Amino acid sequence: MIKQFCFCVLVFFLHSNAIAQDCNLSLKGKVTDFHNNSDIIGASIQIEDSNRFTTTNFDGEFELKNICEGKITLIIKHIACETKKISMYIDKNTFKNIFLEHHVEELTNIEIKANTKTAKTSVETTLKKEVLSSFSDQSIGDALKTITGVSSLNTGNTIVKPMIHGLHSSRLLIINNKVRMFDQEWGEEHAPNIDINSSGRIDVIKGANTLKYGSDAIGGLILISPERFAVKDSIFGSTQISLNSNGLGGNVNTEIVKTYKNGFYGKLQSNYKQFGDFKAPNYYLTNTGQRNFNTSIAIGKNSYEKGFNAYYSFVNNNMAILQSSHIGNVNDLVNAINSNEPRVTEIFSYKINFPKQTITHHLGKLEAYKRFKDFGKLSIQYDFQINRRKEFDLRRGDRSNIPVVDLRLFTNSIQSDLEINYFDNLDINTGVLLRYQQNDAVAGTGTNPLIPDFDKYDFGVYATTNYDLDDTSELSAGFRYDFSRIKARKRYNITDWNETYNYDELFPEFETGAVEGTRIFTKPEFTFHNISASLGYAKSFQKNLSLFINYGLASRLPNPSELFSDGLHHSAARIETGLLTMQKEVANKFVVSLEKQNDNFGFTISPYYKHINGFIQLIPNGITTTIRGAFPVWEYNQTNAQIFGIDVDVNKKISEHFMYNGQVSLIRGDNLSENTPLIHMPANNFGNSISYNNQKLNQLSISLHQNTVLQQNRFPDYNFFTFNPTTQQDVFVDISSTPPAYTLFSLQTSAVFKLFKKGDLKIAFHVDNLLNTSYRNYLNRFRYFADELGRNFKINIKLNY
Amino acid sequence: MKTIKLLALFITTSLVFTACSDDHDDHDHDHEEELITTVIYTLTDGNNTVTLQWEDLDGDTGNAPVITDGILSANTTYTGSIQLLNKTETPAEDITVEVKTEGDEHEFFYSSSVSGVTINKTDVDGNDNPLGIKTTLTTGNTGTGSLTIVLKHEPTKPNNGTADNAGGSTDLEVTFNISVQ
């Protein structure tokens, strides 16, 4: 890193006026940089309420003579530094050391900092605010998908779970404003409860520099950061409106920011999003609308030396779920798979019917930091989250308004982080975490809860270091230890407990002795110790070329659904069973990245290999007969797995205004224990785009994108036969085959118009799925039921003021 | 200093929060309200009554269902009536009532692999479409095979009389072995 210098306007030859007085004391001093102890040259020192001032010399020293005994106040100023006032009592000749902070420069250079990495050796990709704002009416998963190597696991088109290198849910850490998200992320149909409009920047860390946030980032880490504001007196804001032809809806987002010269800032942001039924090329996807309301507030005071940030966000999502996905048993599933159209296709409506999800998520945090001279920076943070998830289904009687799933997850944590930059070439980062989590399966649903009540206690401690080997290379290493205890309360079917799973012999200590009818009340309790580590190396060469090598050891506890699930999953027509015998998952991962950052010709080539011991997967294991007919039983089991592949990005400037971008992502996953492919691995895919940019012509930008997803030919075959008693025939249930390859085109244009002195208007026009292609996506859980979205025209208007 | 006070306040508040929400409702738990444990199809020809029963008292997992099959007389017309019960409630809840109330959203479908056995629905919902709580079952010559009863939620009504054509989602699908003698 290039050290930041204060550039000085030297005020030479200004001498203090020596007024004849009977005062003859002198004040000498030295002004140094708080951060790196370098001398500050040319700082002006003034005695308040007088015209006496001087400046520091080349050694940062100054002298004021003929000072009278008594209290004086000095004002020390330096361009690009924060003005400081010091009061002192002078009764003799005095020497004073004064420290100034590079505050202003640090914070106004955000644009430059936005290109830097979260850690020097990190393998990562960043999405900036401009990209994020074009996704204002979509989900965070949709935005992340534009990154090579990142895909998504969808449930319909509004529930989008990000996936890095084929791994999702509990294997990804999502950090929102330095708070690790706990929003029941274990479920495949649980999308992250984050409002994309409240974020300023998103980093996706595919490599190993994730230990600060947790030990279990087997897939990777998604770091969502708010914008940072310059320290000056200002008020600004923006309002954004987007309108879409598909779903006849859109989003309104507005935000206002007030900043002060003394470092105080406040930001208020809200948005409302509404869509009706979306449309596939040939039919409406009945009951797929949504209504979301999100708001966030941030206040704080930041100076170089100390500061605090407080943040609160509220997310409320109301999402209709494709009506055709509600099915009864395997025969219904067979009917869905064999028919080309969903069973319910009605005319367009804004109505949110059953099935649906309503989720509210509160997130609050308070963070304070202080820098210690010649030592480092200490931060302490407290945060809490309350996630309330209600899932509604089509029910008999008047029960549809009663949720079938009603879970409240409360998480709160306190953590410290100490950055030590005492040593010249070595940075050390260390911290402690305490977390308490409580899940409440809220009573009154009239169903057996899928996830039981539990309490979870976590303790973590970590240390990471970064060492400058020489001017061009860096080495980093990290270590983390986590302790977790989970105490659950759950009722099991007594036959399952005693016979099917043999828990009465494996876990007699969990039994409470209480048996209620066919149910046994148990208190499972688990303790885990986790060790994780990372190693990174970065080397930069000439011509903007750099090489990153990362190794990570990550381990993950089985999540509540892997341990405790036990029951029917309607939209999948399957019974899902977790097992108390699940052990933790341990991954070794290697990621290499060769990058050339250059506008004329740049590239990133990033191969990776992951070996996962005890990989937990959900796979079919037999059929059971219920009163609703036959259901396949899907059970969690553990195997050894490997995932490897390569992500490639290329950018090339064709002419002054034309740019080419290309990306390729190749991935392969193997179940090593059973010698089969891994289930739900993204297919190989590639994309190209050509864009025209003209800064002089209202920043006009036109780009055409092509994206091709090949058919996934490597999948495990879990197909089976079931007997249809009505037709008296065995029917083949093809749940494994994958949809064919597809290619999508999209067009994006935008231009910026200067409206008034401080405001501008950005208008963007997009066409998604330009050719109105009908296709299905292997990674959409609803691929059995309906096609993906058809063509969409979108207008996005953003007014900055 | 101010910051630290604020932080302290925040933590205190949260602890109160934690303490308040610590409502471990070990006894206030839910049970399956919509569970159908028992299907009883009663057939009577005036003199004899045949009862076909399908029962799974502990729900989807756990113990296998207990199925009572039946023997029917050849060339006989029976009056049939179906009853759905949830026996995990005391007294057992009669779910047939719910189905009848929401007759326009439900329909039973009967089919048999024994040739000559035909089942006709004799009741209708509020829209005069077949419902199938009440039926007549007519047997032909002797034979053995199965009898399947399906209850669909939100089927297309009217339909061609087969469960596959009706769409909707399946709330019930039980199969009995029957013998016509």
Image (cartoon, rainbow, N blue to C red):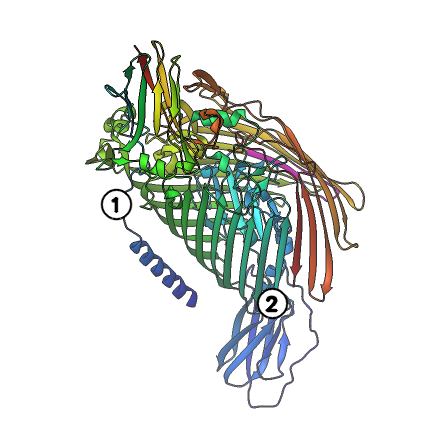
Q: Residue A461: where, in percent of width, then height? A: 40, 46
Q: Looking at numbered disc 1 in the image, what kind of residue is underneath it?
A: Asp
| Chain name for mark 2 | A
B50 lies left or right of A189: left
Rendering quarter of residue A713 = top right
Q: How many marks?
A: 2
Please, what is the three-letter code of the amino acid marked with disc 2?
Ile
**Is residue B99 shown above or below B75?**
below
**Residue A737: % across, % down:** 54, 23
Q: Do the residues labelled 2 and 1 touch (CB within 8 Å)?
A: no
Could you say which is closer to the camera, residue A639 or residue A293? A293
Q: Can residue A29 be seen in this view?
A: yes
Q: Nearer the viewer, mark 2 or mark 1?
A: 1
Residue A599 lies in quadrant: top right
According to the image, label 2 marks what residue?
A235
> Vertical placement of A76 versus A386: above or below?
below
Q: How far apart are marks 2 and 1 (CA)?
A: 52 Å
Q: In which quarter of the image is the C terminus of chain B?
A: top left
What is the chain identity of the residue bearing mark 1? Answer: B
Residue displayed at 60% across by 84% down = A50
> Where, by quadrant of the figure, is residue A786 drawn?
top right
Residue A261 in percent (x, y) is at: 58, 69
Note whether B96 is above or below B66 in the view shown.
below
Of A576 and A428, which appears nearest the observer? A576
Residue B28: which disc? 1
Q: In this view, does A395 lie to the left or right of B72?
A: right
Identify the image quadrant of the N terminus of chain B. bottom left
What residue span does the magenta drawing correspond to? A591-604
Callout 2: SS: strand
User: Which residue appears farthest toward the right when viewing the image?
Assistant: A655
